[in-house]
Image: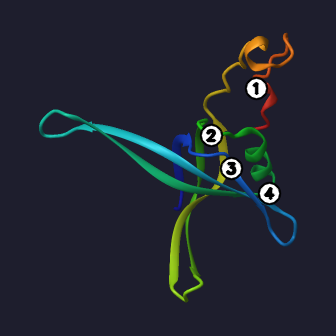
Amino acid sequence: MNRTILIGRLGADPQVNYMPDGGMVANMRIATDESYKNQNGEKIARTEWHRVVTFGKLAEIANDYLKVGRLVCVEGKLRTRKWTDAEKIDRYTTEIVASNINMLDFAPKTQPADEAGTESGIDHTINADDVPF
């Protein structure tokens, strides 16, 4: 069984491209953290970066709702791709092909109107009922 589940934060906004047939592809970088104490009792923190790709409607949703720093749960499968670069050297990358993405936090409320320069009284937060996944 090829199944991967990650919980982490987006390192950047999704990067969107289009396939020749017009379908959308979204590429993301997700950081996962772990910490432990070494033999001397010092706390060690480690961050691992993961490549995530998604297609079609899920790519559109990722583009519309996911932004840098957001905490997400990504479910999918591992895939290793091979390509040949401009110098004719074979290159490989392993990525997660996402089949499901859940936001685990919501955007903080915007700054007050006098600080942000926006109209007062407008709430720009995303509610759980507004998100299609």
At 61% from the left edge and 46% from the top edge, which residue is drawn? 12
Q: What amino acid type is highlighted by mark number 1?
A: Ile
Q: In this rendering, would 75 be left or right of 129? A: left
Q: Quadrant of residue 25?
A: bottom right
Give the labeled residue for mark 1: 126
Crowd rating for badge 4 (residues with CA inside 10 Å; few <14, some 14–19, many 20+): some
Depth-wise, is mark 3 or mark 4 nearer the camera? 3
Secondary structure under tag 4 reads helix
Q: What amino acid type is highlighted by mark number 4?
A: Gly
- Sooner in the amino-acid sequence: mark 3 or mark 1: 3
Crowd rating for badge 3 (residues with CA inside 10 Å; few <14, some 14–19, many 20+): many
Crowd rating for badge 2 (residues with CA inside 10 Å; few <14, some 14–19, many 20+): some
Mark number displayed over residue 14: 3
At 49% from the left edge and 45% from the top edge, which residue is drawn? 31
At 51% from the left edge and 86% from the top edge, which residue is drawn? 89
- Sooner in the amino-acid sequence: mark 2 or mark 1: 2
Mark number displayed over residue 68: 2
Identify the residue at the far left of this view: 40
Secondary structure under tag 3 reads loop
Give the labeled residue for mark 4: 56
Q: x, y (%) of residue 128?
A: 74, 26
Depth-wise, is mark 3 or mark 1 nearer the camera? 3
Q: Are marks 3 and 4 in contact (CB under 8 Å)?
A: no
Q: Nearer the viewer, residue 55 or 111?
A: 111
How far separated are the C-alphas under marks 3 and 2?
8 Å
